Image: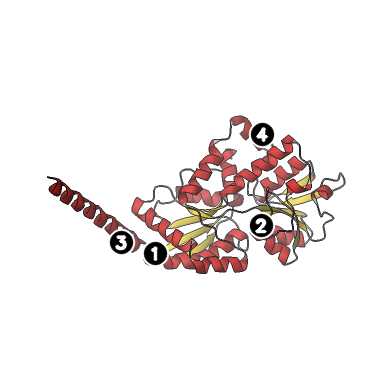
Amino acid sequence: MRCKFSSLALAAALLALGAGAARAQDAAAFYKGKTVRFVVGVGVGGGFDAYARMIAPYLARNLDATVVVENQLGAGGLVALNRISTAQPDGLQLMIVNGTPAALGQLLDQQNVRYDLTKLEHLGVIAAYPWIWLVRKDAPVTSVADAQKPETRLRWGGVGPTDGPADGANITCHALKMNCQIVLGYKGSADIALAMERGEMDALYVSDSSAAQYVKNGAARAVAAMGDKRSKLLPDTPTVFEQTKLDAEQRWWLEFRMSINDLGRILVTTPDVPADRLAFLRAAVKKTLTDPALMAEGEKTERFIDFQEPSVARDLAVKALGGATPEMREKVRKVVLPNQ
């Protein structure tokens, strides 16, 4: 009997293995020769666009498909994310998402939010990163203390109210009690950096990979790293916590903003993609983002890849969105969305 049972179990295992292999072949056949749209929710030239265009050729090879980068502007990426959340669940659209403003938009129940980060199909984290406070190269601000002087007024550029640059600026200005103006309507960080070069804007809150590029080409200067650790790309720039003594309320605000930074650059696709197709897509993404050639290319351009599994991305989203009380949401809303 034991022998017969073992034979049946082995047969069942082999059958399941064969079925799994067949499903994987079906998923590979589905992608072969197809066009996959890699959506970026901000304009050409910024950090997210640069990452997408760097990754696309590698992903195309691993999917045996054509991967087209498509920029769709609006509300700091929220319009594009809404599109992904309601698109056909075929696995032919994916998006590189700025997890921080995406989570903040959902956290604050913005009217234009139609997505749920916990229900989208996560493909992995490309990289998490510190944020940096930049000023135009000729601004009379070299430190946090300079910016806190009563006579100092900074104009910050933003895309939408929860796009990253704008909400980061609002929280920073509120926490540090600075005199600021937040100007929305730019296409992305590259557009804001150009405005700084023209003297239209004074400051920008941006990821360290983009910040390092702007500092290197002389377009801006770094004032502070907005986390509790210095950026590896800008090691000589002290953190905001190093530069000034903070009371409990100020520290709460800066630590709140720092906590949602952990979402980083995440990859998502539409909800309800068939399981076999989703598994194939996730495997292709992992193979792409752990490819030594891509990682080396990223290091050369300071667009670093530090892949984390899809489950990590989803857990971060659940943590960021699940722990906020109604009182906390209202507190943040008043600062980030002062005119709503």
Evaluate if marks 4 and 3 touch, with contact meaning CB atoms under 8 Å apart: no
> Which of the marked residues, 1 or 3, is nearer the chain's N terminus?
3
The secondary structure type at the circle numbered 3 is helix
Cα gap from disc 4 to disc 1, whole angstroms: 46 Å
The secondary structure type at the circle numbered 1 is loop
Q: Amino acid at mark 1?
A: Lys
The structure residue drawn at horizontal position 73% and vertical position 38%, both measured from the top left corner, is 250
**Front disc: 4 or 1:** 4
Q: Position of residue 5 (x, y in %)?
A: 16, 46
The structure residue drawn at horizontal position 67% and vertical position 54%, both measured from the top left corner, is 206
Q: Amino acid at mark 4?
A: Lys
**Front disc: 2 or 4:** 2
> Which of the marked residues, 2 or 4, is nearer the chain's N terminus?
2
In the picture, measured across the screen, residue 111 lies left or right of residue 286, that is right
Return the residue at label 2. 208
Dividing the image into 4 quarters, which one contains the N terminus? top left
Q: Residues within 10 Å of mark 3 (few under 14, many from 20)?
A: some
Q: Residues within 10 Å of mark 1 (few under 14, many from 20)?
A: some
Tell me, for residue 11, which label it has, or none: none
Q: Position of residue 266 (x, y in %)?
A: 53, 53
| Observer-nearest of 47 and 10 | 10
Evaluate if marks 4 and 1 touch, with contact meaning CB atoms under 8 Å apart: no
Q: How is the image coloured?
A: secondary structure
Return the residue at label 1. 34
Return the residue at label 3. 25
Cα gap from disc 2 to disc 1, whole angstroms: 35 Å
Cα gap from disc 4 to disc 3, whole angstroms: 51 Å
